[in-house]
Image (cartoon, helix red, strand yellow):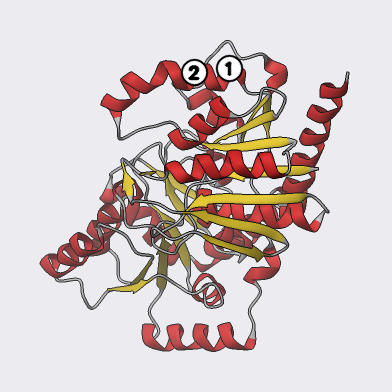
Amino acid sequence: MRVLQFGRFHNEQQNGGVERHQQLLCKGLAANGLDVVYLVASADRQPHDETVDGYRLIQAPSFGTLFSTALSPAQVFKALALHKEKPFDVLHLHFPNPLAHLASMLFPANVKRVITWHSDIVKQKRLLALYRPFLQIVTRRADALIAATSAHYSSSTQIPKDIPYDKLRVIPFGLDFSSLVLTPHSDAVRSTLLSRANGQAIIFALGRHVYYKGFDVLIDAMQHIDAQLILGGDGPLKGQLQDQVDRLGLKNKISFTGSIEEADLPAYFHACDVFCLPSVEQSEAFGLVQLEAMACGKPVICTLLNNGVNVLNVHGETGFAVPVRDSLALADRINQVLNDSGLRLKLGEQARTRALQVYSLEANTQQHIQLYQELMQAKMV
């Protein structure tokens, strides 16, 4: 079976949870014998073509981004050219992404279309008013619609309510947990992080430095917390966040790591006492980094977004959820977990159990393969 995964980006500056999920899915599908092409927009105007983890990664030339969308007409043309060379059985799109929408419109009707709905469009409200009718058309025409949790469907205001129930699927995102096991290298990094903390508790937060991540709220909360915050990731708001830290006099409490190498990442999760996901908008629809922290046995403090974020991190069981943009409530919950070692250990153990039992990459991969096979069988009837 030949599958085209139509993505957005594949670079450290723009990679987020959506991109991480797609990379893992491609890896899992390829490991199960599927012919997988992962097509994304390049970070520059040059094409790139390579094999990664058993799948073919193609980056089409791009002129940058506009409204979080790659300016890469070449990506759509490349998708069509690849199909002409060797037809795809399944076109798997990941929304929101207008380029994926365009590709779906131009592909032959006999190619099965699968859409994974990662989140609603939140920030670009004026453009959404124009785009919504077209978004609903392409969504209705899909052969299957996937979401990571049922809350994605119930909380969405943009998924058409008249899509037949048998087209809707819930497939939880999955992780390759082996990548989070400490190696001699990452254990040495962990020891360094603990040494730098000098006996203080460590809070870890990780993600692109963009508006919906709510890192400014977490920084405000640090005024009321006696601990070290390690803020990982990079993005357009990094300078503003660093200015905020300087303005509040918190440089002795907060460190910025920039992008973290994948080989080093387990060290940060294992070194921390609590992980924080302070997101402020529905654009954060799941929070894959939460899952990574949970798999490492860490309690998570997130915000109450009433979507997949709160399905993954169960309030009172694997961590806590606090009201959005409430820095005092965030500080209170973090302090509660840091000051109670028994609670911290209990939440962490329950978080790890939930992660390993429900959110494995193999389970995610097999459910996707089963769906693809069902669509192909229906095609032959």
- The structure residue drawn at horizontal position 43% and vertical position 49%, both measured from the top left corner, is 302
Say which amino acid is labelled 2.
Answer: Gln
Q: Percent from the top left, x then y, of residue 222?
A: 27, 63
Secondary structure of the residue carrying numbered label 2 = helix
- The structure residue drawn at horizontal position 74% and vertical position 40%, both measured from the top left corner, is 368
Query: Which corner quadrant holds the N terminus?
Result: top right
- The structure residue drawn at horizontal position 41% and vertical position 74%, both measured from the top left corner, is 201
Q: Percent from the top left, x then y, of residue 60?
A: 49, 52
Residue where numbered disc 2 is placed: 136
Residue 148 visible from this viewpoint: no
**Residue reaching furthest top?**
162
Decide if residue 91 is on the left or right side of residue 288: right
Residue where numbered disc 1 is placed: 140
Query: From the viewer's perspective, is residue 196 above or below residue 304?
Result: below
Say which amino acid is labelled 1.
Answer: Arg
Image quarter for residue 223?
bottom left
Q: Percent from the top left, x then y, of residue 361?
A: 71, 54
- Give the crowd class for mark 1: few <14, some 14-19, many >=20 residues within 10 Å: some
Query: From the viewer's perspective, is residue 381 above or below residue 342?
Result: above
Image quarter for residue 116?
top right
Mark drawn on residue 308: none
Decide if residue 381 is on the left or right side of residue 217: right
Q: Which of the two residues, 298 or 136, is positioned nearer the viewer here? A: 136
Query: From the viewer's perspective, is residue 62 above or below residue 253?
Result: above
